[in-house]
Structures are given as structure tokens and as C-alpha cells.
Image (spheres, rainbow, N blue to C red):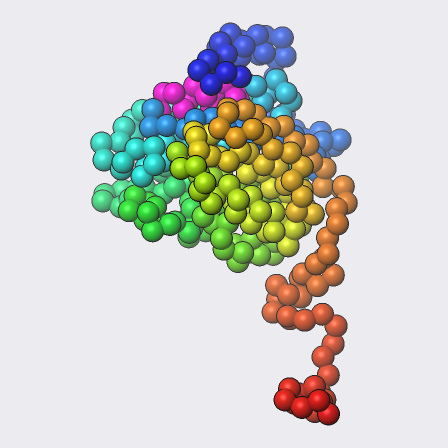
Amino acid sequence: MNKQEFFPWKTIAFLLLFFFPLQPNAQVKKEDSGKMRVASCQFPVSSDIASNLKWIEEQMIEAKLKKATAVHFPECALSGYPGVDMPSMEGFDWVELKKATDSVLSLAKKLQLWVILGSVHQLSGNNKPHNSLYVINAAGEIIDRYDKRFCTSGDLQHFTPGDHFVNFKINEIPCGLLICYDVRFPELYRSYSQAGARFIFQSFHNARAWKGFIHPHIMPVTAQANAASNYFYMSLTNSCVPESWPCHFITPDGLIQNKLTKDVPGVLISDIDIADQYYDASMPYRSEAISGKLNSGTTVKDSLSSNRRAIR
């Protein structure tokens, strides 16, 4: 897909719905339980809500044409990211954002497609908004919202941090959500592990940066470590405005299964089946470690063990 061009998405959507009519409120088929096809998306997120919406709708349609179950977008994908895509939230058009969000909900319903949508969530009075991910089900309903818990010092100039986890299921696969800087806090992943999550959708906005910036080197590898330590599948999405780093899909052994090309719009398609087995070195002791037992096996009371200054 060329950076400067959009598919005629309305025509494609019409043809898709005409030739492949969808049944509302379709139940998960038995053969699909525990399986999911994920579309991890990147596009040049900007302060232009209308442009962001066009990219989102187009990539939703592309995801559906590629038979995805769920489509995952970057941090602040619909709204733009204050402090990076625009200077601040001053003068932000909340009415336009509401209309754009309604358009995404409508298309999700038509396509029967789960959507993980990055945006900002307005609060009352003078309270700063949340930096959020909306969970939109295949009926086009917002069923939950994750608010970025660990905001950077720059984020805190624009956002109110969140205070909760979000756990939900797609095709009976337990899923969780995180955003960008959360990647630096392994405690969040441990909490999702305790809750039984098997898949983490994590949205980033590490774009409009300078050549040589560190994030392309540390963000994916940190996510890989968190995936392997907790036996998660992970979808990582990011804006693709140069300089950036691309969408990644990580398997529970911590390996990168696939990734897109950086700085270019695209949709990364990945299949999972939670019945598949991956290398999991920490599995025998993970639950004990989470509960506070920070050694394997059984310790002993022995003076030669407790005296750490003598050989014998």
C-alpha cells in the first residue's frame, strides 16, 4: 500500500458485505475456539482525526479481507498523540473524535471484527483525559477500556494515568492490554499472568523521532523478554511516521514470528492456536515465583549454608 494513497474503502466494504453477507451476533464456532488471526496495523498517525479514521477503516477492511478475527491499532491511533503529533490537547475537537469513534464502531459491526483501538478518552471538568485502548467486539460494542497506567513524565502533562487491568476473551483466548511505556514494568505482565492471560495487545507510539534513537533497539526486545517470562503471545503496534520501528508479533517462547517494514504503512497477519506448544523454561516455577517463593526446589537449614563468610 502506497503511503500517499488509500484504497476506495467504501467500495471495497460494499463488495465485501454484498458477496460475503455476515450473520449478526455469530457464535464462536467450536473449531475456532482457542484460535485467532490477528491483524497488527501501522500507519502514519497524525493530529488529523479524519486522516487517521480513513487509515483505520481501510486497514479494518484489509484485515477482514485477510480473514482476521481481531485488528490492533497503535497508541492514540484515532486521536493523534499529544506532545508528538500535536503540541497539546488545547483546542482538541472532541465532537469530531466522537463521530470518528462511532464510525469505527459501525464498521466493526458490519465486518464482525474485533478492534483494539488507540485513542484518548475525555474526562469531566479540568481532569486530563486518559490515553486509552478501547476493546470493541464483533458486534461493534465497546466492552471495556484500558487506560495507560504508567505515563511518562511527558505524558503526564497531557494525560491522567489509569488504575486498572483489562481482561477479556476472543474465541475463548484470554487477552490483556498494555500501552507503550508500560513495557518497562514487568509487574504489569506478572499480574496479567496471574489472571490467566495468554495474549497481550500492546500499542506504542514511538515515531517522529530522530535517527539513532534508542527505542527501536530496546522496545521489541523488552517485550520479547516479558512474553517469554510469562508465556504470552504479543502483538506490538506502532505509528510509522519516520523515524519509527515496525509492528512485531511475538510467540510465547519470546521469538519474533514476523514484523513489518519500518516507516511504511502495513497490516501484519498472524495466526495463533493456544494448543500449540512453545519452549517455556520458567514454566515449572513461574507460579511459585509469582506467589513469592523465589527459588526452585527446597532450601535447607545448614550452618555451612547460612555462614556465607567461611568455606567450612
Q: Is residue 119 visible?
A: no
Residue drawn 63% across the image and 28% down it = 269
Q: Position of residue 133 (x, y in %)?
A: 45, 38
| Quadrant assignment, res 275 | top right
Place of residue 28 in the rendered image (x, y in percent of width and height, measured from the top left): 67, 30
User: Compared to 165, does 260 lie above or below?
Assistant: above
Q: Height in image: 178 above or below 190?
A: above
Whether residue 228 is visible, yes or no, is yes
Q: Is most of the magenta stretch helix, strand or loop?
A: helix
In this rendering, the answer to whether 198 lies above or below 65 is below
In this rendering, would 263 be left or right of 306? left
Q: Please give the range of residues in magenta.
A: 49-61
| Rendering coords of residue 30 (x, y %) | 74, 32
Q: Tell me if residue 46 comes above or below residue 303 in the rendering.
A: above
Q: Percent x, y for residue 157?
A: 28, 47
Residue 286 vs residue 166, the one in the foreground: 286
Marks counted in the figure total 0
In the rendered structure, does residue 59 fall within the stretch colored magenta? yes
Q: Residue at x 66, y 47 (%)?
A: 254
Q: Is residue 23 left or right of residue 123?
A: right
Foreground pick, 80 / 11: 80
- Please say whether residue 169 is one of the residues in the magenta stretch: no
Residue at left 37%, top 28%? 46
- Outermost residue toward the front? 212
Q: Seen in the image, is 77 located left or right of residue 156?
A: right
Residue displayed at 49% across by 32% down: 73
Q: Quadrant of the C terminus?
A: bottom right
